[in-house]
Amino acid sequence: MQSKRDLWLLSGATLLIHLTCLTQYGWFRDELYYVACSHHLDWGYVDQPPMIALVAWIARHLFGETLWGIRLVSAVAGACIVFLTGMLARRMGANRFAQNIAALCSMIAPMYLAAGHFLSMNVFEPLVWMSMAYIAIAIFDGGDERLWLLFGVLAGLGLENKHSTLFFGSSFVIAMLLTPQRKHFARKWIWLGGVLAALIFLPNVLWEVQHHFATYELLSNIAHGHKNAEVTPLSFFLGQLLLMHPLTLPIWILGIIWLIRRPNYRVLGLTFVILFIEFVVMKGKIYYLAPAYPMLFAAGAISVGQALSLSGWSRLSRWGRQAESLSYTILVMGGALLAPYVIPILPVETFIRYEQALHVEPPKTENHAMGPLPQQYADMFGWPEMVAAVARAYDMLTPAEKAKCAIFAQNYGQAGAIDHFGPQYGLPHAISGHQSYFLWGPQGATGEVLIVLDDNQETLEELFNDVRPAGDVTHPLNMPYEHWTIHICRGPKQSMAELWPKVKKWM
């Protein structure tokens, strides 16, 4: 069996790339929210299971509430995706060349590069799904069936990270039923693995029951609110092309075919096909399928290696070594071409010129007007400036007013920014009706003096006797919808207890 040295080098290179640009831009909107959630640890949140908040809590206590500390976890996870992809190929019998090609595909995939740059659930999802796939391969190759217990543990942890693991698990089960691997359902270990997964997932299920299935309510609101960009079968496929990099297309297509043609591994190929159909039918976001690609890269790389071998190619020959080097070079250079779109390796002004020169736009997942930057980057700008503007409004208050002032934000990005950057200005914690902030309530606010972000004068005058503008928030690089006016509101026309149910915004 070939050495793992190359896989360690490729994953190490991936980590190094992330480390060089870890703090090139600022805090991402969702990161601010996850840190806020880590101050309210629970078994669930309106828009996610508990795992990401726990990860943020651990990172915060290890490294402080620093940008590099929060992102270091994701950078390591991104490097692990590359290593795991190569190990999947190795597990399926790949030689050194195929292992490296598979790992390189994951290394240059824009989706995995982006996920490894900032803290999110998306960077851990491929690790969970593909670790489950690795264990399944071991079992299908004749391994100990007690490994289904580990499979179940991973499934449970995956569900505590992101509910979309349900789609992978259900597709995997359906695929097993369609193949001779259904024989495993006649034995106990796979069922015991399922029990373990259910037990690990149970606390989040109980949280959902206690909160009247808040996540389902949120997803229903999003589905009926036209927030997400319209998805068609063609746009979904083209999205896969960009998220996984156009150069990897022939490899993962070959991977599907190779897996389906191998009786031992057919379950994995069918799992991907079923997942693809599910997400197209349900009009899921284009990145929902992303965690499943490493197993295709692994299988496709083997297929490429086998085809070259059958045509007389040998890595020991001069032509073979040149072909191998050329393959690596094409993937690396192609990956480098798109990398600035997903990791901030360029200064922002340079990136804007680069994007204009290439005329390539990342696929949109939500319906928003755009500024000069893609949304992923735009959401990393403007937060410190916003909080500074709010602090100037806060300083307009008398000491007595400051003592009873609260800051109301319209979304979790604004609220998370106030909670993170606000203490240096002596600002109170933010309150909001958005997502889990609504569940955390007004946190003692009476509404007597309220600094309100991102609302209009007319609406506020219906709720308060005295409404005064106190400054504008704008930034040349952030999302256009984050340009708005700050208002200071006094003399509420109703109590906070009466007002709070009306501010709920799960969207």
Image: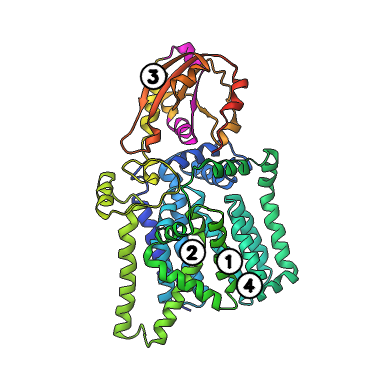
Disc 4/disc 3 C-alpha distance (Å): 64 Å
Q: Are marks 1 and 3 in contact (CB under 8 Å)?
A: no
Q: Is residue 14 magenta?
A: no
Q: Residue at x 44, y 23 (%)?
A: 456
Q: Quadrant of residue 68?
A: top left
Res. 271 mark? 1
What percent of the width, then of the height, locates residue 27? 41, 40
* Residue 179 falls left or right of residue 506: right
Residue 503: x and y, percent?
56, 28
Comparing 84 with 186, the one in front is: 186
The type of residue carrying mark 4 is Ile
Work out which quarter of the rendered image holds the C terminus and state it.
Answer: top right
- The main secondary structure of the magenta stretch is helix
Label 4 element class: helix
**Chain part drawn in magenta:** 397-421
Q: Are marks 1 and 2 in contact (CB under 8 Å)?
A: no
Observer-nearest residue: 138 or 226?
226
* Rendered image: mark on residue 470: 3
Does residue 449 lie above or below 283 as drawn?
above
Q: How would you rate the neighbour count of disc 3 (Cα within 10 Å): few for under 14, some for 14-19, many for 20 or more?
A: some
Residue that appears at 32% across and 38% down: 477
- N-term mark: 4 or 3: 4
Residue 323 falls in image quadrant? bottom left
Q: Label 3's element?
A: strand
Pinpoint residue 385: horizontal percent, then vertical percent: 35, 31
Q: Is 453 above or below relative to 20?
A: above
Left or right of 282, for residue 110: left
Gap in angstroms between the C-alphas marked 3 and 2 = 50 Å
Amino acid type, residue under disc 3 in the picture: Ala
Question: Which residue is denoted by mark 2 in the rendering?
Answer: 293
Q: Earlier in the sequence, mark 1 or mark 3?
A: 1
User: Which callout, 2 or 4, points at the residue further toward the start of the chain?
Assistant: 4
